Image (cartoon, rainbow, N blue to C red):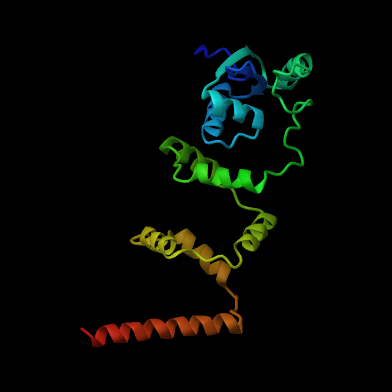
């Protein structure tokens, strides 16, 4: 990979395995794409089963940048490579038309399980977290997105460890005046349902009973 700042990071590439199989692809960020291939193959969750099988047997591959080109030319360049080689039994590209590899496809339960296991314990670097935080600034979820998030969390309970971690993270943390004003405005005129009021009352009673018991034993 060249370090020349004038050369675009986008381009087409080829992956070769020791058994003669090869794969063509394109990316707007070639170094990142290579890392993605290696990450998925090492963890056994690559979406291309033929590539995964070759990697499982031989344990390595060669990533070669064939040519750098502008982003708007990627599809045409990759399609030309696939058209010229798709009939070759050593070519392990699994789709004939570039840009539609996963359209309408859903990962199997087995693949999803493998991806979850592979991601367990994985932590983003400080640089990656900073970029994600910056990207989220000023963004507000749409009503549709908030509705989906609400439905997806219905019935889910946080584990004791998760609750403890949230509680620990909030210790000593103060809301800004703007945040407090926003909460107050959002809560103005809002009424709890009878069920909600009953739960709040029961929780408060239990809490005060705990405080009284604790005071009596000291």
Viewer-nearest residue: 21 or 125: 21
Residue 172 % position (x, y): 33, 61
Residue 106 at x, y percent in the picture: 71, 44
Q: Position of residue 11 (x, y in %)?
A: 64, 18
Q: Nearer the viewer, residue 210 or 19?
A: 19
Task: Tell me which residue sits at (65%, 63%) in the image.
Answer: 151
Residue 164 is left or right of residue 115, and the answer is left
Residue 122 locus on image (x, y percent): 46, 42
Identify whether 60 is placed above or below 157: above
**Would residue 215 be found to the left or right of residue 42 on screen?**
left
Q: Please state, as top left, top right, bottom left or bottom right, where the C terminus lies in the image.
A: bottom left
> Residue sitting at 61 percent across and 29 percent down?
53
Residue at horizontal 23%, vertical 85%? Answer: 217
**103 and 19: which one is in front?**
19
Q: Residue furthest left?
A: 218
User: Which quadrant of the view contains residue 160?
Assistant: bottom left
Q: Quadrant of residue 8?
A: top right
Foreground: 8 or 174? 8
The image shows residue 170, relative to residue 114, as above or below, that is below
Total label count? 0
Residue 58 in the image: above or below residue 207: above
Residue drawn at the location 77% of the way across and 42% of the way down: 104
Q: Is residue 200 left or right of residue 21?
A: left
């Amino acid at each position: 990979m060249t370090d020349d700042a004038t050369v675009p990071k986008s381009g087409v590439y080829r992956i070769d395995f020791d058994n003669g199989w090869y794969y063509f692809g394109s990316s707007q960020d070639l170094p990142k794409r290579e890392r993605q291939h290696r990450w998925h193959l090492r963890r056994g969750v690559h979406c291309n089963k033929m590539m995964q099988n070759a990697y499982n047997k031989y344990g390595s591959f060669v990533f070669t940048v064939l040519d750098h080109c502008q982003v708007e030319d990627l599809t045409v360049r990759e399609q030309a490579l696939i058209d010229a080689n798709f009939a070759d039994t050593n070519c392990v590209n699994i789709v004939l038309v570039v840009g539609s590899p996963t359209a309408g496809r859903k990962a199997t339960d087995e693949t999803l399980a493998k991806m979850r296991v592979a991601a367990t314990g994985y932590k983003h670097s400080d640089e990656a977290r900073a970029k994600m935080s910056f990207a989220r600034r000023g963004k507000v979820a749409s009503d549709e997105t908030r509705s989906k998030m609400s439905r997806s969390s219905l019935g889910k309970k946080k584990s004791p460890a998760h609750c403890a971690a949230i509680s620990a993270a909030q210790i000593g943390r103060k809301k800004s005046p703007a945040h407090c004003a926003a909460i107050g405005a959002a809560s103005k005129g809002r009424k709890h349902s009878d069920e909600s009021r009953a739960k709040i009352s029961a929780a408060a009673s239990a809490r005060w009973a705990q405080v009284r018991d604790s005071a009596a034993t000291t």
